[in-house]
Amino acid sequence: MTNKFLTTLGLLLLLALPVQAADKGGIELKSTAEVEITVKNDQGVSQVTRVDAATAKVVPGDTVIFTTYYANIGANPATDIVIDNPLPEHMLYLGGSAEGMTPRIEFSVDHGKTFAAASKLRIKDAAGQERPATAADYTHIRWTMVGTLEKGAKGSVSFRAKVE
C-alpha cells in the first residue's frame, strides 16, 4: 500500500462529514474504514472478521468498507438529515454496495457539486461524447434520510471501494 493511500485513508477518517439537520448540534457521527480478513477461532473454524484498515495490510485490489455511524444525541427529533461521503483518492466504488438511510441514495460524478440517482448520471468522455456514468466514475455518495430521526435513535450508512 502506498503512503499516498494511507494519507488519503487517514484524512478521510479525520474529516467531519457534512451533515445537515434541523437540530445540527444533535447529530453525532463516527466514521470507520475496515477490511474483512479470515481468521481461525480457537476451534480451528475459519471466520470472517472486520479490522481497522489503518492497521491492516491493505494492498491494491483489496476492498475497504467505509461506514459512517450516526446518532441523534440532541434533545429533539432531527429531520432533513443528509450525509455526504467522498470516495477517497485511489479508490473505486463497488457498484451496488451503498447501504443505509434508504430509500434515497444518490451519487456525484463532479466532486459533490451535483447529485442524482445512478441511472440519471452522465459524463463526457475524453472525446467529448456523453455516456452513462458507471460506478467507477462516482466521486461522492449522498444518503438522504426520509422522515425523522428520533432523539436517541442511531444507525449507519456504508459503502465498499476497491484500492486501485
Image (cartoon, rainbow, N blue to C red):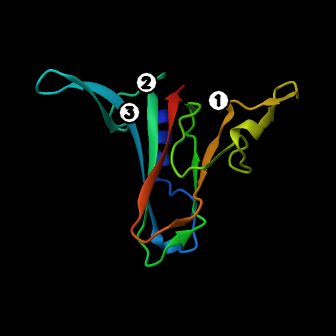
Rendering coords of residue 164 (x, y %): 54, 25
The residue positioned 68% from the left and 49% from the top of the image is: 112
Residue labelled with disc 3: 35
Say if residue 69 shows up in the picture: no
Q: Is residue 120 above or below residue 21?
A: above
Mark 3 residue element: strand
Q: Earlier in the sequence, mark 2 or mark 1?
A: 2
- Disc with the residue nearer the chain's start (1 vs 3): 3
Q: Is residue 75 something one can see in this rendering? A: yes
Q: CA distance from mark 2 to mark 1?
A: 18 Å
Query: Outermost residue, bottom direction?
Result: 75
**The label number, if any, that marks residue 103 in the structure image:** none
Q: Looking at the picture, how far across and down is residue 51, in whole percent?
A: 31, 36
Q: Residue at x 43, y 78 (%)?
A: 75
Q: List the residue tagged with mark 2.
A: 59
Q: Amino acid at mark 1?
A: Ala
What SS does tag 2 mark? loop
Which element is circle 1 on? helix
| Left or right: residue 87 compared with residue 112 | left
Amino acid, disc 3: Val
Q: Which mark is residue 136?
A: 1
